[in-house]
Every structure is written in structure tokens, then in C-alpha cells.
Image (spheres, rainbow, N blue to C red):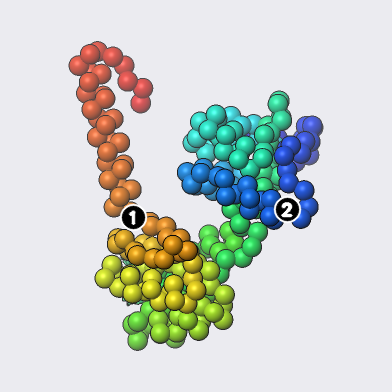
Amino acid sequence: MGARRGEDVEVVTAPGRLPGNDEPAVRERARAIPEAAVARLAVYLRVLSGLAEQDVTTISSEELSAAAGVNSAKLRKDLSYIGSYGTRGVGYEVEVLVDQIERILGLTRKHSVCVVGIGNLGHALANYAGFPGRGFPVSALFDVDDDLIGVPVGGILVSHVDDIPRVCAEREVSIGVIATPPPAAQGVCDRLVSAGVQCILNFAPVVLQVPDHVEVRKVDLAVEMQILSFHVARRADEAANADESGMVVPG
Ligand SMILES: NC(=O)c1ccc[n+]([C@@H]2O[C@H](COP(=O)([O-])OP(=O)(O)OC[C@H]3O[C@@H](n4cnc5c(N)ncnc54)[C@H](O)[C@@H]3O)[C@@H](O)[C@H]2O)c1
């Protein structure tokens, strides 16, 4: 796939790369990107970071779209939002694209993360090694259980939820992750918002009420499973219909 460092390829800088001190221009561009494209940019970044680690220097849009599971027209459109159009016959320069996507996604700044609710999921999140590498260090943990307060999890001492305002301010927490049982989630959310946390990732299966300036993303495994169930059922229906009509259905 693509070209590796040291291989004889024409090295190109993707056109449209923003010059030196370009933060305002990057943020301006970021505002115009549709939400669905933002999610795909994060997927491209994961693929590209893996390629960079393998010293792959360039990649065609077809290769990148196949690796990301997105059709190539959509990929080109997504990358055009960040001003990256690739070069005919060469494709995209991996490092340049990684840099552009990281800046658009705001990953060049550190986001300090807290996790509230250090049960099964909270333990897993606190220990998740993928966060620090991507610029999301977990810097604070909170719970209400006396047996957990003061106990280190993933190298961080668990604090009581009453300390959310002080600890979040001291550690400059910008993202709060809620991993409490559903009935506790809104109260925890309110505490985080009062402490100035403006981005919340909610694992509890409840809809949170927040002021307009707060961004909430919900991870709902049940909904994801139901969507998959729908696709399984639809494929089964298609296969049954094809059987009846004697057609061959691709696997
Ligand atoms: N475990 C999973 O795989 C999983 C997957 C997806 C979603 N979820 C959801 O994530 C949440 C947590 O699941 P879990 O399995 O880790 O539960 P858990 O019961 O193991 O842990 C919940 C933790 O939250 C703490 N807690 C309770 N009230 C609190 C409050 N007011 N403030 C701070 N902490 C409080 C408890 O002391 C406990 O440590 C649930 O809403 C669950 O539906 C869990």
C-alpha cells in the first residue's frame, strides 16, 4: 500500500496546506465541516497514523478510502473540506494529511479528561492506553464510593465527586466522561457543567439536559447493536428474496 520512506517516489506537498500561523484559518475552515465528515476525518486519521508508523509516505485516495471503509468520492469530498486535494498520480502525502486533520480536529492542543463513575467501565476507561497517545490524557477520576476514594486507578487517585470543581479547575479538565449508573448521570453532568467542563462524553443510557454552550456526545451500545441487528435482518431478507428469484447475492 502507498509508498514507504526511502522508496523512489516524487515527494509532493498536498496543495491547500495552510501556512505557518494559521489557527484562525483552521478554525474558520473547521466550522464549515459537516458533523458526519468530522467523524470520518477521525477514522482517516487513525488509518493514516498507522501508515505513518509503518513509514508509508504517500497513499492514493483509493487505498485510503478502502482502508477507511468509505467510498473514494466521499473521501475526496471530506478531504476537500480541510483544503487537501492530493496530487494526480501520487495521492496524498501521509504526514501532511495527518498534520492537517490533527489541526482541524483540534488535536494539537491537549485535552485533559476526567472520568466520573469508576466502576467496570470507568476502570477500563481510566486504563485505556489509547487516550494519552491521541492527546487525551485522563487526569482526574471521580466517584462517590468511599471504598474507591483515594485509590489509584490507572495511576490516578480517585477523588470524591464533591471535589469536581476544585480538581477540574486545577487540572484544567476540558472533557468529562460519565460512566455512572443512569440515575446519577444528570446530577454528575450538572456538576461538570458548573465546574466549567464544556464537552461531555456520556456512556449512561440517558438523555442529558445541558446549556447550549455544552457539547454532549453519547455512546449508546444498545443503539449500535440495534442498528447492526437491522442490517443483519435486512441481509437475511435480501438473501431470502434472492433465493426465491434464483439470483446470486454477493456475500
Ligand atoms: N460496563 C459496560 O460495558 C458498559 C457499556 C456501555 C455502557 N455502560 C453504561 O456505563 C455506566 C457504568 O456502567 P458500569 O458497568 O461501569 O457500572 P458500575 O456499577 O460498575 O459502576 C458505576 C460506578 O459509578 C459510581 N457512581 C454511582 N453514583 C455516582 C455518582 N452520583 N457520582 C459519581 N459516581 C457514581 C459507582 O460508585 C460505581 O463505581 C452505566 O450507565 C452503564 O449503563 C456500561
Reading the image, the residue beneath label 1 is: 220
26 sits to left or right of 182: right
Question: Which quadrant of the frame does ligand 1 lie within?
Answer: bottom left
108 sits to left or right of 139: right
Disc 1 Cβ-to-ligand 1 distance below 8 Å: yes
User: x%, y% of residue 25?
Assistant: 69, 50
Vertical arrangement, residue 66 with respect to residue 28, above or below: above
Reading the image, the residue beneath label 2 is: 22
Residue 120 is drawn in which quadrant? bottom left
User: x%, y% of residue 18?
Assistant: 73, 46
User: x%, y% of residue 150?
Assistant: 44, 86
Mark in the foreground, 1 or 2: 2
User: For this rendering, which residue is in front, 120 or 226?
Assistant: 226
User: For this rendering, which residue is in front, 130 or 193?
Assistant: 193
Q: Name the residue type under label 2.
A: Asp
Instruction: Identify the secondary structure beneath mark 1.
Output: loop
Figure quadrant of the N terminus: top right
